[in-house]
Image (tube, grey):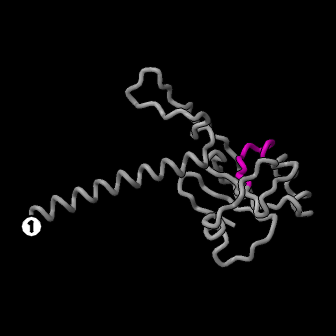
């Protein structure tokens, strides 16, 4: 009986590790749009000779005020905005210009379901995202968070 229990436990642990790895890959593809599928076709299998690996993201080094260098490819700015927010209309063009100049990505969420001129394709913020980013914070726009795409660490 003890051997069955041990084998069962090992099988469950192996299955949970595979599930966690798959979930982490899916989360990373959300933060890396080039990893998300754009067509309606199913992904190709690893054995498919026609399958081509995605090119590796080149590091974008940025020197902080304390002298430390960080790779901007590891970070994304998550923006919460509203289409009718006057502060968003002032802030969003500056953020878009800065992101293009410096080289960091922006993931725009809209609270009211509408984008603006700078981020017309902002995604409606689902309740789970709002709970994750605003657990004990008042919801105000524009609000930005810095998110590490590898660890999903979020900094307000």
> Which residue lies at the image location 53% right of the left edge and 56% below the top edge?
151
Query: Relative to 144, does residue 38 appear above or below in the rendering?
Result: above
- The C terminus lies in which quarter of the figure? bottom right
Is 145 contained in the magenta span? no
Q: Which residue is label 1 attached to?
A: 2
Left or right? Give the position of 95 relative to 132: right
85 or 31: nearer the eye?
85
> Which residue lies at the image location 69% right of the left edge and 61% below the top edge?
125
Number of on-image labels: 1
Q: Which residues are magenta?
A: 99-108
Query: Relative to 145, does residue 108 appear above or below in the rendering?
Result: above
Query: Relative to 123, does residue 36 appear above or below in the rendering?
Result: above
- Find residue 126 and report its horizontal and vertical position in percent: 65, 62
- Find residue 143 and report its horizontal and vertical position in percent: 77, 65
147 or 137: nearer the eye?
137
Provide the secondary structure element on which disc 1 rests: helix
- The N terminus lies in which quarter of the figure? bottom left
Label 1 neighbour load within 10 Å: few <14, some 14-19, many 20+: few
Is 106 contained in the magenta span? yes
- Find residue 12 and report its horizontal and vertical position in percent: 26, 59
> Which residue lies at the image location 46% right of the left edge and 52% below the top edge?
23
> Which residue lies at the image location 61% right of the left edge and 36% below the top edge?
38
Q: Which quadrant of the structure image shows residue 145?
A: bottom right
Left or right? Give the position of 139 relative to 43: right
Left or right? Give the position of 133 relative to 79: left
């Amino acid at each position: 009986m003890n051997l069955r229990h041990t084998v069962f436990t090992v099988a469950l642990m192996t299955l949970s590790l595979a599930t966690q790895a798959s979930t982490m890959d899916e989360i990373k593809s959300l933060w890396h749009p080039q990893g998300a599928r754009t067509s309606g076709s199913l992904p190709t299998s690893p054995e498919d000779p026609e399958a081509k690996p995605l090119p590796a993201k080149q590091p974008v080094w940025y020197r902080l005020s304390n002298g430390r260098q960080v790779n901007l490819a590891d970070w994304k700015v998550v923006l919460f905005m509203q289409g009718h927010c006057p502060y968003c209309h002032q802030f969003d063009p500056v953020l878009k210009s800065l992101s293009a100049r410096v080289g960091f990505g922006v993931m725009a969420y809209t609270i009211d379901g509408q984008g603006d001129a700078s981020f017309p394709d902002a995604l409606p913020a689902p309740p789970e995202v709002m709970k994750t980013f605003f657990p004990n914070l008042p919801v105000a726009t524009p609000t930005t968070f810095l998110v590490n795409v590898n660890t999903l660490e979020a900094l307000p």
